[in-house]
Image (tube, grey):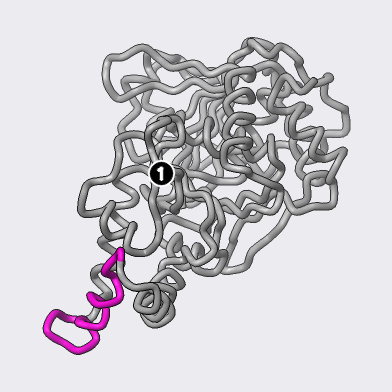
Amino acid sequence: MIQTLPQALLRQADTRGSAIALRYKRLGIWHARSWSELAQDVSRLAAALHQLGLSRGADLLIISQARSEALLLALAAQWLGGSVTLLDPELDNRQLLARLRPTFVLAEALDAVQQVRSIDSQPRVVLYLDGRGVNASENPGLSAFAELSVGVTAAPPAPVTETTATAFVFHPTTDAPAQRLSHGQLLEGARKLVTREALSANEEALAARVFAASGQARYLLAPWLSAGFCLNFPEALATRDTDRRELGPTLVLGTRESYARLEHWARERLPLPGTLSHRLYRWAMVPQVHVFRRWLGYWLIRRPLLDVLGLSRLRVPLLVGPGLTEESAEFFAALGICPGNWQEPSTPRVLVDAPSHLISQSV
C-alpha cells in the first residue's frame, strides 16, 4: 500500500512511466518530464542530499515561489525521511529563520539568500535557484541547485515508508503554532478529493503561486501524485495569465483573493459602459434566462471571455479558505463557474480556476 508521497511517485513511474507528469516553462518554451524521468530526477537528488548529510528526521527549508525544482527537492528530502518547511519568498522571514535555525535551505533568488545569510546561525547547506547577483565564492556552503546532483553516482537509500512521518511544515504569519502534515494525512485527503471530483490522469493543473500554504500540499500536490495528472509551472508570476491561456487547465486551485484578481483582470478588458458591445455583454451575462438566449450569449460573449481567461477547459476549480465575495460569485456564476470549498458539504460543487492568488493561490 502507498504510504508516503515518494512511494506515490514511484507507483506512477511504474504504472505510467512514459506519461507526462510535469511541465515547466523556461524562456518561453515548455519543457516536459515523464513520470519515469521525474522519479529518476528525485532519486538522484535524494542521493545528493544523503551525501550532504540529510537523513531521517531532518528538515529542508524552502523559500521559493512554485518552481519545479523546489517540488523535486522537497520529494527528495521526503524520500530520505525528512520534512519540508515552506516559506513565502515575498515575506520577511528573518525572525522565523533565526528561530528555526535551519540546516538545509533552498533559496530561490538573491533576496531569499540574503534573508538566510542575515541570521547568526548559518545553515550547513544553502542552495539557490536563480544565481543573478549571488556570489557563491564568498559564501561557504552556498551552491547552485543545478550542480547538486552533478557527478552523483551512488544510489539513494530506499524511500521511507512511515505514513505518520511529517511531510510538510507550514508556519502561519501569526503567533499560531506550526501546522504539520504527515504523508498519511495528505494521501488520505488526496484520495477523498480524487473520488469526490472524479479526478483522472487526464487533468491539466497549473501551479502558479508560492507553495507556502497548506492548501497547495493538500489540494494540488498530493492529488497530483495520487491521480497521476500533469502539473504545469508557468515561467513567472508575470506570465501566469498568458501561460494559463496557452494551457487551458482543467483543474485549478484558488483563494478568494486570487479569484478576485482574475475577476478584476477580466473587468478591465470589458467594453466601455454605454457602448453597444457593453450592452451585448450585459445581455449575455444574465443568468436564468431562456435557453436560446443562454446558448447565443455563450457563443457570442461567455465562451470568448472564458478563452481569454484561460478557463474554457476548466472542469475542477478548487477554492480554499473563505468563500468568494458576492460580486465575484455573481461574476463567475454568469460564466457558468460556481467555485466552492470542496470540504464543505453544503457548498456547491467546485468549478473554477484561480491564478496567483487565483492559481494556487494557484492557476
Q: Is residue 156 above or below residue 289?
A: above
Residue at 34 percent across and 25 percent down: it is 94
> What residue is rendered at 43% in x and 63% in y?
241
Question: Residue 69, located in which quarter of the rendered image?
Answer: top right
Instruction: Locate residue 290, reporting x and y percent.
Output: 33, 73
Residue 6: x %, y % from top left: 73, 28
Residue 228 in the image: above or below residue 183: below
Q: Name the residue at 58% across, 19% down.
A: 185
Query: Measured from the top left, where is residue 262 in percent x and y?
Result: 33, 58
Outermost residue toward the bottom in this view: 276
Q: Is residue 110 visible?
A: no
**Front-most of residues 164 and 137:** 164
Inspect the magenta stretch and tell me whether residue 332 lies in it.
no
Query: Residue 76 sits in which quadrant?
Result: top right
Closer-to-camera residue (317/338): 338
Residue pictured at 40% horizontal, 61% vertical:
336
Disc 1 target residue: 361
Amino acid at the residue labelled 1: Gln
Q: What is the secondary structure assignment of the residue under circle 1?
A: loop
Segment tinted magenta in the rendering: 272-288
The N terminus: image quadrant: top right
